Image (cartoon, rainbow, N blue to C red):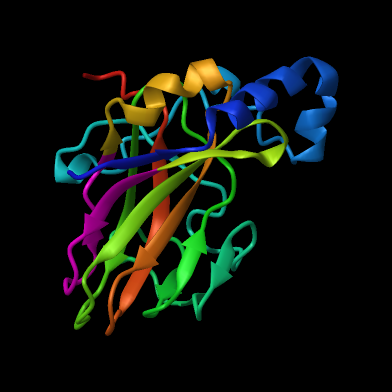
Amino acid sequence: MKRIVSFAVLTSVCVSLALTAASGSSAATHDGGLFGGLLGSNCPTSGTKVFSRWNDYNAYYLAPNGGFENGSTGWSLSGGASVGYGNQPFFGSGSHSLVLPSGSKATSPVICLGPKNVALRMFGSDAGGTDSGLHVRVLWYGLLNILLGSSDYNTFAPGNGWAPTDSVKSTGGLNVLIPIVGSTSARVQITPLGSGSAWLIDDFFIDPWASACC
């Protein structure tokens, strides 16, 4: 898996950290709780083995509005991305999914990823698509909503019907520095590559515990 990590200028990080004492609890209020995830403190304490039928026994929690049943609430959509009718076929509940035509982009609500390794997984379909795949990037934030860096995690293969995507895992890179820079809060950005995208995404799950099983 190819992983490209970019960092903000070190000075910005230092300034961000220095603002902690001055900002106090008002920083969390200002950015809507973006930093409540410091060292994973606001992560759920348990999850469910939603992908066990695919031999993945890690415990995951559903990201905020990860099933898109509340429309695009919490998500930032651009370039024609939208929430439409249609649901992954493996679970009975739900009736919506994220539609990602070529040129679109979707950025998740703030999520807690925890201070260790992390796994992201979702259901995707690109049946009949002629694009070059679906790219997943994680944007990491510091104090006062300052972007500290980004991690290009994976690109899902195009052209297939509904199935769980690969489990996107981080093992090092920027994650090693997260406890130091003081942020485990992040947003996930999903972008189809190339022309002819027919991507649908549903039920976006997160394992923030480095998955305890391994």
- In this view, the residue in front, 9 or 176, is 9
Residue 8: percent from left, percent from top: 52, 37
Does residue 116 lie above or below 201 as drawn? above
Task: Residue at 31%, 24% (x, y): give it.
Answer: 211
Task: Residue at 41%, 55% (x, y): give it.
Answer: 203
In the image, residue 160 lies in the stretch drawn in magenta: yes
Task: Residue at 31%, 18% (x, y): give it.
Answer: 212
Evaluate whether residue 143 shows in this view: yes
Q: How many marks?
A: 0
In the image, residue 48 lies in the stretch drawn in magenta: no
Q: Which residues are magenta?
A: 151-168
Task: Residue at 26%, 42% (x, y): give it.
Answer: 3
- In this view, the residue in front, 46 or 14, is 14
Q: Is residue 155 left or right of residue 180?
A: left
Does residue 210 lie above or below 92 as drawn? above
Q: Is residue 18 left or right of residue 85?
A: right
Which quadrant, please, contains the N terminus? top left
Evaluate whether residue 95 shows in this view: no
Residue 157: percent from left, percent from top: 17, 63
Q: Quadrant of residue 129?
A: bottom left
- In this view, the residue in front, 36 or 59, is 36
Residue 96: percent from left, percent from top: 47, 70
Residue 139: percent from left, percent from top: 49, 44
Which quadrant, please, contains the C terminus? top left
